[in-house]
Amino acid sequence: MRFKNAAFWSFTLLTLIFTSCRSPNKEAATLLIYGGPIYTVDTTQATVEAVATKDNKILFAGSLEDAQQYKNDQTQVIDLKGKTMTPGLIEGHGHFMGLGYNELNLDLINTTSYQEIIDAVAAAVEEAEPGEWITGRGWHQSKWTDMPSDTVSGFQTHYRLSEVSPENPVYLSHASGHAGFANAAAMELAGVQILPKDGIDKFDVKGGEVMRDDFGRPTGIFNERAQGLITKHIPENTPEKDAKAFELAVAACHRNGITGFHDAGIGRKNIALYEEMKAADKMRIRIYAMLTGFDKALLNEWYKKGPMIDPEHLVTIRSVKLNCDGALGSRGAWLLESYSDRPGHFGHETLPMDFVKETALNGLQHGFQVCSHAIGDRANKEILDRYEIAFDELADKASDHRFRIEHAQHLHPDDIPRFAGLGVIPAMQAVHLSSDRPWAIDRLGEQRIKEGAYMWQALLQSGIPIVNGTDVPVEPLNPIASLYASISRKTLKGTPEGGYEPEQKMTREQALRSYTLDAAYGAFEEDIKGSITVGKLADFTIYSQDLMTVAEEEFLNTEIAMTIFDGKVVYTRE
């Protein structure tokens, strides 16, 4: 009897084993994607035929035949029909609410002359109540096709603007955000007047400049920290307007294939808004936020409570943003040698370097990454020096700091290898080259441009990854433009032939990594996103054509066809 029972159980066990081998108990996928090139940015398999997801995680990536085993009647199936898919793109440096407000206020990013700005303001005046502020952003005098005759230090003056807006104060931020343009009504509210006879300017601001003509009259241009003289008089936005701007920013990200966003500098108001949006289930973007270094009390509060690493990966706060110099366009970038087109002027140190060192030490002590804005070569050098001091002083806490320099646009050649040597990540927006390189040579001269500007390949070859992006709203959010700049080093009009300093181009693989896995690494998130790898978040971007093979001259015609966030389709191009 015992023999019969043993034989029965042996037969049953063999049957179970055989059955399980033939029909494995696979998890059912909620989404199956196939039918076009899928680039994983995963070194174990660069491309796959199909991807299966379950809820918001990647369940399988591999052959279509194997992927079919995860399909059941409830699985949503997406046939790419020849279109291309990559991991969801990550905007590595931008200003999220600035993106939203650019869609609510005057958007001047495509203006090509002073006259276009005047016309835009005049139209806004027609719709505004007397005394109502008119604000906007995006103008850049170096991108205009012609300059007005009455310029001061390379900038326009306010008189024509003031003529069309006599009763409405106007403040228009430069595309870089490092300067602004005010009309007479705005300057009157701020009390900014002609320089007194004694020559003492009570509005002299350390780390900034109120531009004046030869007669001491303010021209309307406020550079760097002097902008606060005007902006403190602009009324606060309402909660309703903030919520609207937030929703517009999310929609803009989805239209552009962006599923993650490194928000470069936020304060209490934005933190509260993001918490509110998450609670209302409206946080359909992954925000990696940097605390603004302008609010020391805010930093001290966060040092005490420590980083906020969201288990849902929607809003994470574990870094600090420091603004240490200005921009090249407004001649605010802090240089080791003076500007070629403004001798004797070296730009602005907009934050004391002692505070950079203090913040670096606090960051290491309390678990916060430090991300410092630096465009000029002196700013980059000084920040690297302060980081190095902090790393040496707290060596036991500096093993995986991932401190960053935001922009790293112009470097002294001696400082290029220091990034890899110190483990400091350069967050560089490639599209800035397309916009700035044609006139940046006037600011720096040929030698400094060739030896130290936009040094992507030199940094990559030194062994440090690059985080890419657009610095929106300084540039449009469009990642296709920044990827094109990365691989071509041309303007968006396709000039010059061969690109500027072509030896510094990224390969297509490097460019894609800079917008995906390397961007995730720059936020300590490479284990959860940035590649199409089993177990990672189901965020994907789908394109109208193959980024890896399309001819360079056709690259900019690429469109975002679909965006998938958290395992759900959130955007489909009509």
Image (cartoon, rainbow, N blue to C red):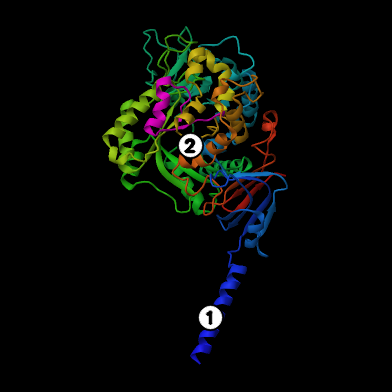
- The C terminus lies in which quarter of the figure? top right
- The residue segment tinted magenta is 406-430
Q: Which of marks 2 and 1 is nearer the N terminus?
A: 1
Residue that sits furthest to the bottom in the current view: 1
Q: Name which residue lies at 58% across and 64% down.
A: 27
Q: Quadrant of residue 295?
A: top left
Can residue 170 be seen from the camera position used here? no
Q: Residue type at mark 1?
A: Ser
Whether residue 422 is in magenta: the answer is yes
Q: Name which residue lies at 67% across and 51% down.
A: 34
Residue 471 or residue 38, whichever sits in front: 38
Whether residue 26 is in magenta: the answer is no
Residue 9 or residue 277, whichever sits in front: 9
Callout in the foreground (2, 1): 1
Residue that sits furthest to the left in the current view: 393
Q: Name which residue lies at 61% across and 60% down.
A: 29
Q: In the rendered image of this protein, does residue 234 appear above or below residue 328?
A: below
Is 544 displayed left or right of 26 in the figure?
Answer: right
Q: Position of residue 564 (x, y in %)?
A: 61, 49
Q: Which residue is labeled 2 in the image?
A: 236
Q: Position of residue 427 (x, y in %)?
A: 47, 32
Q: Position of residue 256 (x, y in %)?
A: 62, 40
Can residue 526 be seen from the camera position used here? yes
Q: Where is residue 453 in the image (x, y as percent from the top left)?
A: 49, 21
Residue 129 or residue 203, whichever sits in front: 203
- What is the secondary structure assignment of the residue under circle 2? loop
Q: Distance between the residues labelled 2 and 1?
A: 77 Å
Q: Quadrant of residue 494?
A: top right
Q: Which residue is labeled 1 in the image?
A: 10
Q: How many neighbours does mark 1 have within 10 angstroms: few (below 14), some (14-19), or many (20 or more)?
A: few
- What is the secondary structure assignment of the residue under circle 1? helix
